[in-house]
Amino acid sequence: MTEPTPVTPIDAPAGSVHDRLGAATVSVPPELLDRIASTGTAVLTDDNTRAEAGRDWWPLAIGWAAEGGVPQRPAAVVRPTSTEQVSGVLAASNEARVPVTAAAGRSGVCGGSVPVHGGIALDMTAMTGLIDVDETSLTADVRAGTFGPDLEVALGAVGDGYTLGHWPQSMDLSTVGGWLACRGAGQYSTRYGKIEDMVLGLEVVLADGRVVRTEGRAPRAATGPNLTQLFVGSEGTLGVITEARLRIHPLPKAQGRRALGFTTFVAGLEACRRILRRGATPAVLRLYDQAESARADEWVEKFKEIGQLMGISVDELVIEEETPILEAAPLS
């Protein structure tokens, strides 16, 4: 099972780490932590765990870590294993007026998972796993703390193999709940869509502990309003996502990748437009300008005179014969 990837080391002993944001924080009564622990939920208050929960991959925070600081530490880290435990944590914290910040892989680069006002950090990484796959409707029920690689391995082991088709750059660091809470996009979104196109329904725990379930009983619905999309992208402000029903796809029988060169950026854009207007939906369709194309050393000699580079990846491509992966194909 994938574990959260640590950010760069904090250059200070755990007990000497300091908070950099300096925001007003809310104290957490010991009675609240005792109440949460009595439900079987793990409650962690050691200095190292609190320091790690006080940051993500925000570049500014990485710089602060070199000086022994983090944006803001929580008073405690709580790690539930079930929706019932999440409900109990939020209900108790709501009664005590203690803020709760949900987090999992903490792969964000904007400080979104930082518990700005202290309180409790709700670590969702113990709520993992593929719950069920409906091979008829092509849907999968997944717990929110499931990391991307684990989900793809689990889906690939069902029947002839399936995929969600969501491959963000943070794939190894991020979870299903994070994708949904932040309305994530993946490398293959040209073919499979963004995460809001893949989600059919959610299980969400509200701030007072109530559990709500949105759409998703069938692959399509015609009733409204769409509460699922209300929670997607809300970054934990409206509730904590605990489970999701997602649309899945059979694994492609074959894949093909090509790199094409163009004399001008405008010519590359025209090629992209023509591909999509013909109804083609490659998994990846990316156009890079001359400066970006030259960043990869192995491409430099091939494309230094052509200039612009387009990358394309096609699922379910029937490959009749071996084709060179690099092609210089200027479009006039």
Image: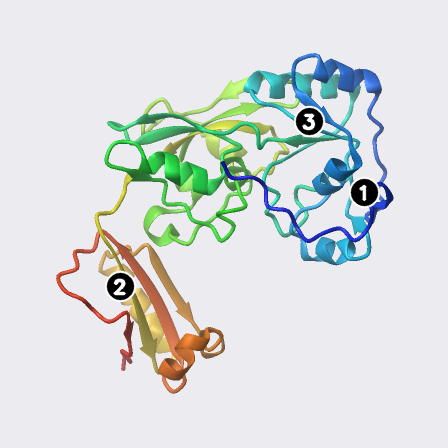
Seen from the viewer's position, the closer of residues 92 and 201 is 92
**In the displayed structure image, the side of residue 192 where residue 33 appears, left or right:** right
Residue underneath mark 2: 275
Asked whether the residues under the numbered discs 1 and 3 touch, taking CB atoms below 8 Å apart as contact, a structural biologist would say: no
Residue at 28 percent of width and 60 percent of height: 276
Whichever of callouts 2 and 3 sits on the residue coming sooner in the sequence is 3
Would you call the spot at circle 3 few (<14 residues within 10 Å), some (14-19), or many (20 or more)? many
305 is higher (above) or lower (below) than 238: below
Disc 1 or 3, which lies upstream in sequence?
A: 1
Circle 1 sits on which residue? 14
Q: Can residue 113 be seen in this view?
A: yes
Residue 307 is drawn in which quadrant? bottom left
List x then y, in percent, for residue 175: 52, 39
Task: Estimate the x, y position of residue 317 in percent, counting from the top left.
Answer: 20, 55
Graded by Cα atoms within 10 Å as few (under 14), some (14 to 19) or many (20 or more), the crowding at tag 2 reads: some
**In terms of image quadrants, where is residue 257?**
bottom left
Q: Does 311 sit left or right of 184 as displayed?
A: left
Kindly state the secondary structure of the residue where label 3 is placed: strand
Q: Which of marks 1 and 3 is in front?
A: 1
Q: Which of 117 and 328 is in front in this view?
A: 328
Q: What residue type is labelled 2?
A: Ile
Q: Distance between the residues labelled 2 and 1?
A: 54 Å
Q: Which amino acid does label 1 sit on?
A: Ala
Q: Which residue occupies 55% across, 20% down?
A: 82
> Which residue lies at the image location 29% right of the left edge and 80% below the top edge?
330
Q: Distance between the residues labelled 1 and 3?
A: 19 Å
Image quarter in which the C terminus is found: bottom left
Marks 2 and 3, Cα distance to the nearest angstrom?
49 Å
Label tally? 3
Pointer 3 residue:
78
Residue 111: x %, y % from top left: 68, 48
